[in-house]
Amino acid sequence: MKKSKLSFFRIKITALAGCAVITVIYGILVSLPVFKCKKYKNRISAGQYETMRLRNDENNYRDFIIKYRTQKKELEGILFNDRDVSSFLEEISLIARKSHIKISEMKTRKFKKVEPKNSTSGNSYSGNKPSGNKEDKPLFLAAMPIDIRIEGRFSSIVNFLVFLEGYRQLITLSNVEIRIKKYPLLRCKFTLRLYSLKSGSELKDKR
């Protein structure tokens, strides 16, 4: 009788152990696909994040290009191109005659890159742009000095200088000197600068 109870107890223990083993194995088999699923899900999420980042970078780059071209167009509206320079010189000659101003000298110099103060590297407007076409090459702000000497009455000279300072395109006046020639006539000399966007090769050719 005792032997029978012992055998039954062993069978029960064995059955319980077997159930435990089966439960563990079942748990492993069930959790393995779940783990793999989470792993692939994480990979998919990482891929989606990278795709979103690349799309954002592309959109930011596109916006940057649009902004650059818009600003460049606006700058070109107030800066001079080669054709504008000759038209400007003709215009101020005409205005001088109408203002009873005699231009005794008008000496133009070559365009030179404008160097910002406290900087030795120069100032490129376009920065790091794609160089796939001519428009995307780096452009530099350049100035062309014009040394001018004029003669006339004080009021005529003042009106002429005011006209130049209010010109529709970007110019600057410097080194203004006024002296008496034979009263009421005065002599005036000054340096006028016209501004334009030039590529490095254009500035190099003009040296």
Image (spheres, grey):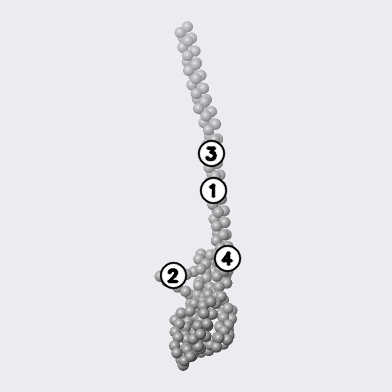
Determine the CA span between mark 4 and mark 3: 47 Å
Residue 204: image tag: none
Residue 70: image tag: 4
Determine the CA span between mark 3 and mark 2: 53 Å
Q: Residues within 10 Å of mark 2 (few under 14, many from 20)?
A: few
Determine the CA span between mark 4 and mark 1: 31 Å
Label 3 sits on residue:
38
For mark 2, give the secondary structure: loop
Check contact, mark 4 vs mark 2: CB within 8 A. Answer: no
Check contact, mark 4 vs mark 1: CB within 8 A. Answer: no
Q: Amino acid at mark 2?
A: Ser
Check contact, mark 3 vs mark 1: CB within 8 A. Answer: no
Label 2 sits on residue:
121
Q: Amino acid at mark 1?
A: Tyr
Q: Which of these two is toward me, 75 or 150? A: 150
The residue lying at 45 percent from left, 8 percent from top is 2
Of labels 2 and 1, earlier in sequence is: 1
Q: Can the viewer see residue 105?
A: no
Q: Amino acid at mark 3?
A: Lys
The residue lying at 54 percent from left, 44 percent from top is 45
